Image: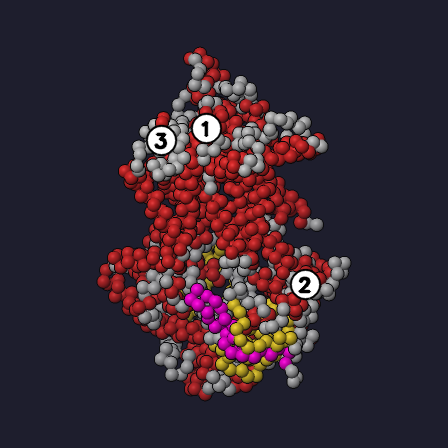
């Protein structure tokens, strides 16, 4: 263990941009020993991916290693010639990426792509390449490898594609695997399967792994040691247990705190001295506001047999002042459900009763003029996509007020500013365009637009999925505050049971268009009954649940008393 | 509010120009073309129609910068005066094609269904012909006049705008900001006109500029083969056609200068395309 | 395996899709011939026709009957290959077009080969070295290429290579009058002469062909180079290229097997547009070089208001274009495994 397999010392990577040279990575030092799994954790812009690209020397054209050294197995990667690097890549160290489908050549069968690597590194000849490629597919636990050999990436699921990418990376039995956000965008159950596979295969072969991730929970579950990066620098490095038990750097502490744990409350996500911390009130919910009965949505297929039942007989209700969570993996029908309730999509059958009126019977096309329009609003998943790129923040927030409340002139101006203030958006940002705002600011604009009309029901469609955890912590607390102030009901849609639980008293678990289980958040977490709920829960990686500091325990008793 | 936005726009235009000198060059050329089109007849030294047998086929000189043609007419004057006609034909054609085409495409892309199918069939039929050949056929059938050149050029330009508008509208039809606009109580037509269509303008601007160049080429090509504009009217295509007969005997200037003018005009619009995109695209506004 | 019949079915589907397009072409060409603002009989009889001959044409074309009946008669004529008589030469239009078609095909085909051979490497080079001098050169050539009127380029080349340098023969048709045209096999003079073993004639035919083909090729160079560059740049930025590089594949393998094969797909689709440009510009080039193809035939017919000839030309060009587009579609269907599998 004396000489590490990978030794990065004081690495600095520069990027030439329009505004001059920018340091993406500054003075970063990381080591990975043989057989060790090291996690590099950081939020967007922390330089974690750039570091890993520098190790493989596959930086973009604009980037270059400006200082420091990277030594891998005795070879100085920074100085090696391209030929040596090509022999190293794939053979000695290899890499897997996020978005596995895009990471594969779309018009080459997966078997051939594996063969290419084997032949390139002289581990197979044209004669036996096919047989060896099938062996590799078998090694990554792909069923029926003989026929999968001929498959093209678009014919495989995301999880299956990631297995193929792993197969390519491990085909030549390298010593180091760099995994760059390998499960971002995959469902939690798929994520668990992929990560377990990586762990199993690397352990089998005594390989080292460098896991790049934004998810502290994931790093905690799979890494021996964790390096925390912020703005291009390493701020802290420790073995996993130590890091969680005793984080030293304030940024690590903040990050740790912002990552939801099994037992954390929404206020716990922010530091104790932060004035934005909020605790949901314990008022019991009021009258029934929304009642969904036997909701069905069928999408016609190309042929008769192809029709697809996205939502299949859904019934539930939301009471006024209540937050209901709707949890499920991609394709379970949760977004289709929210579109139907928002009247953006017409149901095939069933009823949507809002304040007793069946709004499901009003065609979506004509709903713009309906009296309930202002009471039903939504916050969208992708803050960038949900803002008109040619409109300033002010105009986006004004739009519903002008259209549905007929506010104009100075009243409009005052109202927009009041709403912006409510969501914590400073006045001077109001005249900016979306591309001039950060992700968190765009999310605030989207929320401001949705609450401007003081709706009765607000649907939150994965409102924090595109945000960094520290921003997510702030936004979640903001949502708690807004609900109290405006007396809204929430329907919170997410794939992440752990986040939903923070905001919602009651949770529905959906699978294949149906509800498989429902109940109070605590009940579902503590005593899940349906096997699918259990599977979901088991798949979510958690940081160790002991709180980092004593402070949040004082609130525990209060919050635990919320729902008897 | 409006005066400040004008100032903003001017500042942004200056930024675009200084950032990309090619755009500045294109803007300068464009200005020259506009001046020639507006004030051309007033600026030229000779009457473009006046023949003079004693001065026929003279090479370029101080008196006649671009030489004289076989009838002794001043080539420089004719080239400058022709600018207006060439520009008007293509401008009218492109404007017509843009207005009709983008409206058709936007409706087809937004509403889909029958509107889309009918538009699609119509465009497929136009595109089934080699476009210049279709223009020839239309002018031959409808009559050999300048108006018909404009209509023919508009018809063959139409599919570009319609297809582009359709595609650009279609990808935004279910964008988050469009759904948000629906929740804000906007009806379909308002969403199409205020939310989606303005966002399709940057790529359309580029297309307009490129098509202007292409329209000029087509109109000139039609008159080169004897359609539309007729001699002795000064027009670049005809002048090249007339000069073509003298190339093999070495009198190059007859065809050369109108040809270069034509080329520069097209070149200008092609370069301007990229500059225009920078100008109207708020993504690049800093 | 299962994949082959699926592919074939897709090809069959592509062929079927051409049918509505063909109907559209026939309708448009009918409208162009019969629904003219003036009196079609006057047009078809030609400028020098007498009252009786106009009346005769009116009856023979069926112009005294209703439009639907006329349309059916028109379709019937087309099915029998009846495109009418050329008033200037007195020959059936179909015969003249078929004898002249090989000349046009030879010119267009040669031009496209030239422009693909130059444009694709240029586009690839530019894409692999963005912002280098070769990229700037590529951009300049591309913009200049689309800005050059073909008839002007042709004249400039004639002046330079014929008048000034004397390297090329006079721009007068396919073969200098000193030579006899080679025995007809394919209709392409260069190929026919080679088949005949007459290298002297082949050389002479090629010498005549080079300038017009380069003129036409320069015009179609731009869209191909532009598209190749854009497609290559986009593909090279793709995640799967990064995977291939991270797996240690060699530069050539990444560039050709991975990047180029993906980039070629959008280039194939733009070839349709390129053919459209090429067939249109073909008319102008044939006029400049007195090339005896169907384009110059149409121009001559236009001058004397020979409408049957012009309409026959428009129709045959459209049919040719449909066939070329079909070839592109079928190639694409066979090359891209994703097609028809997704929604």
Name the residue: 52% across, 37% down.
Answer: C164
Mark 2: which secondary structure?
Answer: helix
- The answer to whether residue C303 is seen in the rendering is yes
Q: Is the residue A551 above or below the residue B6 in the image? A: below
What's the mark number on residue C32? 1
Q: What kind of secondary structure does the magenta stretch mostly adopt?
A: strand
Q: Which of the two marks, 2 or 1, is nearer to us in this view?
A: 2
Q: The disc numbered 2 marks a residue on which chain?
A: A
- Which region shows up in magenta? A4-28
**Distance between mark 3 and mark 1 Cα atoms:** 38 Å
Q: Is the residue A560 above or below the residue A107 in the image? A: below
The residue that label 2 is drawn on is: A117
The residue that label 3 is drawn on is: B73
- Report if the CB atoms under discs 2 and 3 are less than 8 Å apart: no
Mark 3: which secondary structure?
Answer: loop
Q: Which of the two marks, 2 or 3, is nearer to us in this view?
A: 3
Residue A219 picture location, percent across and down:
55, 76
Packing grade of label 3 (10 A; few <14, some 14-19, many >=20) is many
Q: Are marks 2 and 3 on the same chain?
A: no
Name the residue: 45% across, 43% down.
Answer: C147
What's the mark number on residue C221? none
Mark 1: which secondary structure?
Answer: helix
């Amino acid at each position: 263990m004396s000489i590490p397999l990978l030794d990065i010392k004081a690495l600095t990577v520069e990027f030439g941009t329009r505004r001059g040279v920018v340091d993406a990575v500054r003075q970063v030092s990381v080591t990975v020993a043989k057989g060790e799994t090291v996690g590099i954790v950081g939020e967007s812009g922390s330089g974690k991916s750039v570091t890993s690209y520098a190790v493989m020397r596959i930086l973009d054209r604009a980037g270059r290693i400006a200082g420091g050294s990277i030594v891998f197995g005795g070879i100085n990667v920074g100085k090696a010639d391209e030929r040596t690097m090509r022999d190293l890549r794939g053979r000695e160290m290899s890499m897997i990426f996020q978005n596995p489908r895009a990471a594969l050549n779309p018009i080459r069968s997966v078997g051939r792509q594996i063969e290419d690597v084997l032949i390139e590194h002289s581990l197979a000849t044209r004669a036996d390449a096919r047989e060896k490629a099938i062996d590799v597919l078998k090694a990554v636990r792909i069923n029926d490898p003989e026929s999968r050999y001929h498959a093209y990436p678009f014919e495989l699921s995301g999880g299956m594609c990631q297995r193929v990418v792993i197969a390519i990376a491990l085909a030549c039995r390298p010593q180091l695997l760099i995994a760059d956000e390998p499960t971002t965008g995959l469902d939690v159950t798929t994520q668990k399967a992929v990560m377990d596979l990586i762990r199993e295969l690397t352990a089998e072969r005594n390989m080292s792994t460098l896991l790049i991730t934004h998810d502290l929970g994931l790093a905690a579950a799979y890494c021996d040691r964790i390096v925390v990066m912020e703005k291009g620098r390493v701020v802290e490095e420790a073995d996993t247990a130590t890091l969680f038990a005793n984080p030293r750097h304030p940024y690590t502490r903040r990050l740790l705190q912002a990552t939801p744990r099994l037992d954390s409350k929404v206020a716990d996500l922010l530091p104790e001295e932060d004035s934005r911390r909020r605790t949901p009130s314990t008022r019991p919910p009021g009258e029934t506001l929304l009642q969904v009965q036997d909701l069905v949505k069928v999408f016609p297929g190309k042929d008769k047999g192809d029709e697809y039942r996205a939502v299949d007989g859904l019934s539930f209700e939301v009471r006024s002042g209540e937050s209901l969570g709707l949890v499920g993996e991609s394709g379970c029908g949760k977004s289709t459900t929210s579109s139907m309730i928002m009247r953006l999509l017409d149901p095939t059958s069933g009823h949507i009763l809002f304040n007793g009126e069946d709004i499901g019977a009003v065609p979506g096309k004509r709903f713009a003029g309906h009296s309930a329009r202002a009471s039903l609003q939504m916050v969208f998943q992708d803050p960038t996509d949900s803002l008109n790129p040619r409109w300033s923040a002010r105009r986006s927030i004004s739009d519903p007020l002008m259209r549905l409340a007929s506010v104009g002139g100075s009243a409009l101006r005052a109202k927009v500013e009041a709403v912006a203030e409510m969501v914590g958006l400073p006045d001077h940002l109001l005249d900016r365009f979306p591309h001039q705002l950060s992700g968190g600011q765009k999310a605030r604009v989207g929320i401001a637009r949705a609450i401007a009309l003081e709706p009765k029901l607000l649907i939150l469609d994965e409102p924090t999925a595109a945000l960094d955890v520290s921003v997510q912590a702030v936004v979640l607390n903001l949502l708690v505050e807004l609900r109290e102030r405006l007396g809204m009901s929430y329907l919170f849609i997410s794939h992440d049971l752990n986040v939903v639980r923070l905001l919602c008293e009651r949770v529905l678990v959906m699978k294949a268009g149906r509800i498989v289980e429902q109940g109070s958040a605590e009940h579902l977490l503590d005593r899940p009954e349906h096997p699918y709920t259990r599977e979901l829960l088991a798949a979510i990686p958690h940081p160790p649940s002991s709180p980092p500091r004593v402070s949040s325990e004082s609130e525990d008793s209060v919050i635990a008393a919320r729902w008897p | 509010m409006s005066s400040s936005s004008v100032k903003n726009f001017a500042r942004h235009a200056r930024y675009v120009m200084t950032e990309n000198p090619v755009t500045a060059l294109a803007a300068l050329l464009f200005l020259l073309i506009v001046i020639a089109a507006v004030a051309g007849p007033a600026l030229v030294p000779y009457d473009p129609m006046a023949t003079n047998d004693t001065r026929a086929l003279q090479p370029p000189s101080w008196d006649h910068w671009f030489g004289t043609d076989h009838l002794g007419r001043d080539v420089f004057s004719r080239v400058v005066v022709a600018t207006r006609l060439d520009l008007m034909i293509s401008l009218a054609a492109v404007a017509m094609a843009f207005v009709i085409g983008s409206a058709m495409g936007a409706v087809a892309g937004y509403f889909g269904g029958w509107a889309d199918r009918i538009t699609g069939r119509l465009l497929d039929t136009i595109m089934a012909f080699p476009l210049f050949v279709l223009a020839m056929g239309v002018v031959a059938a409808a009559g050999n006049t300048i108006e018909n050149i404009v209509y023919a050029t508009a018809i063959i330009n139409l599919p570009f705008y319609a297809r582009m508008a359709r595609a650009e509208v279609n990808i935004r039809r279910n964008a988050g900001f469009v759904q948000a606009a629906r929740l804000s109580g906007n009806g379909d037509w308002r969403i199409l006109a205020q939310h989606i269509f303005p966002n399709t303008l940057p790529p359309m601007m580029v297309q307009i500029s490129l098509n202007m160049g292409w329209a000029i080429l087509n109109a000139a090509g039609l008159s080169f083969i004897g359609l539309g504009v007729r001699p002795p009217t000064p027009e670049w295509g005809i002048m090249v056609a007339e000069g073509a007969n003298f190339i093999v005997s070495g009198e190059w200037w007859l065809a050369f200068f109108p040809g270069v003018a034509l080329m520069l005009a097209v070149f200008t619009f092609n370069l301007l395309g990229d500059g225009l995109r920078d100008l109207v695209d708020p993504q690049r506004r800093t | 395996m299962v994949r082959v019949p699926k592919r074939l079915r897709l090809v069959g589907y592509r062929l079927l899709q051409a049918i509505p397009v063909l109907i559209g072409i026939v309708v448009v060409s009918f409208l162009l011939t019969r629904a003219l603002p003036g009196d079609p009989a006057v047009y078809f009889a030609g400028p020098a026709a007498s009252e009786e001959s106009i009346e005769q044409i009116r009856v023979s074309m069926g112009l005294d009957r209703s439009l639907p009946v006329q349309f059916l008669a028109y379709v019937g004529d087309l099915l029998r290959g009846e495109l009418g008589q050329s008033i200037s030469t007195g020959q059936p239009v179909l015969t003249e077009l078929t004898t002249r078609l090989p000349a046009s095909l030879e010119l267009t085909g040669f031009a496209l080969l030239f422009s693909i051979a130059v444009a694709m490497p240029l586009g690839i080079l530019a894409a692999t070295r963005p912002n280098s001098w070769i990229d700037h050169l590529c951009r300049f050539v591309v913009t200049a290429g689309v800005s050059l009127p073909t008839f002007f380029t042709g004249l400039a080349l004639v002046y330079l290579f014929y008048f000034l340098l004397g390297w090329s023969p006079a721009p007068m048709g396919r073969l200098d009058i000193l030579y006899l045209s080679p025995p007809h096999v394919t209709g392409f003079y260069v190929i026919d002469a080679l088949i005949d073993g007459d290298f002297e004639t082949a050389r002479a035919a090629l010498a005549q062909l080079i300038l017009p083909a380069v003129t036409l090729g320069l015009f179609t160079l731009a869209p191909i180079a532009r598209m190749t560059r854009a497609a290559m740049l986009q593909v090279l930025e793709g995640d799967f290229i990064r995977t291939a590089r991270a797996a240690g594949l060699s530069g050539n393998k990444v560039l050709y097997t991975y990047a180029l094969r993906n980039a070629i797909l959008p280039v194939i689709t733009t070839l349709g547009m390129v053919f459209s440009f090429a067939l249109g510009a073909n008319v102008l080039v044939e006029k400049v070089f007195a090339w005896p193809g169907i384009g110059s035939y149409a121009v001559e017919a236009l001058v004397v208001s020979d409408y049957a000839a012009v309409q026959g030309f428009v129709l045959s060009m459209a049919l040719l274009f449909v066939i070329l587009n079909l070839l592109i579609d079928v190639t694409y269907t066979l090359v891209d495994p994703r097609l028809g599998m997704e929604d």
